């Protein structure tokens, strides 16, 4: 389930990136790298589980699938959080370079 959720996020972010690749002001490529890296990690994990026990691979209890779904959603949420922090830092650096950084009245 984690693999399915992260692959979906990777495909959606890739489509978003390719539709807006001429103007990548939102650094969507970072989001693509995060989700494709997570998908690759879960793919290797699934292959390792399959090589350990090929017969029991399809016998996953519902409780475990729910845990995997929560983990996948957490990975997608954390990826969005990292991407947003990166955007905020990039914007702050851009403002500092332009010279209109916010100066408090203190």
Image (cartoon, rainbow, N blue to C red):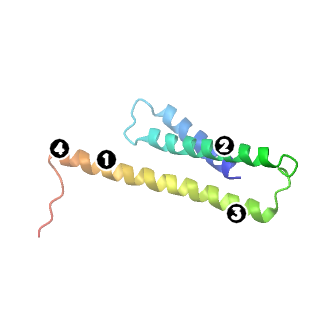
Residue reaching furthest to the bottom: 106
**Mark 2 / mark 3, whichever is N-terminal:** 2
Labelled pair 1, 2 in contact (Cβ < 8 Å) = no
Front of the two marks 1 and 2: 2
Front of the two marks 2 and 3: 2
**Mark 4 / mark 1, whichever is N-terminal:** 1
Alpha carbon of mark 3 to alpha carbon of mark 4: how far?
A: 46 Å
Front of the two marks 2 and 4: 2
Secondary element type, mark 4: helix
Please give the residue where the numbered disc 4 appears in the rendered image. 98
How many dots with numbers?
A: 4
Rendered residue at 56%/36% (across/down): 15
Secondary element type, mark 3: helix
Front of the two marks 4 and 1: 1
Please give the residue where the numbered disc 2 appears in the rendered image. 44
Label 4 crowd (10 A; few <14 / some 14-19 / many >=20): few
What x and y, as percent, mark residue 81? 46, 56
């Amino acid at each position: 389930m984690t693999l399915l959720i992260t692959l979906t996020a990777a495909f959606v972010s890739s489509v978003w990136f390719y539709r807006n690749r001429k103007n990548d002001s939102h650094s969507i490529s970072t989001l693509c790298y995060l989700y494709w890296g997570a998908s690759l990690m879960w793919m290797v994990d699934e292959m390792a589980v399959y090589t350990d026990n090929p017969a029991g691979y399809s016998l996953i209890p519902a409780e475990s699938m729910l845990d995997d779904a929560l983990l996948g959603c957490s990975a997608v949420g954390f990826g969005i959080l990292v991407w947003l922090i990166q955007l905020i830092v990039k914007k702050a650096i851009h403002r500092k370079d332009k010279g209109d950084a916010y100066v408090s009245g203190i």
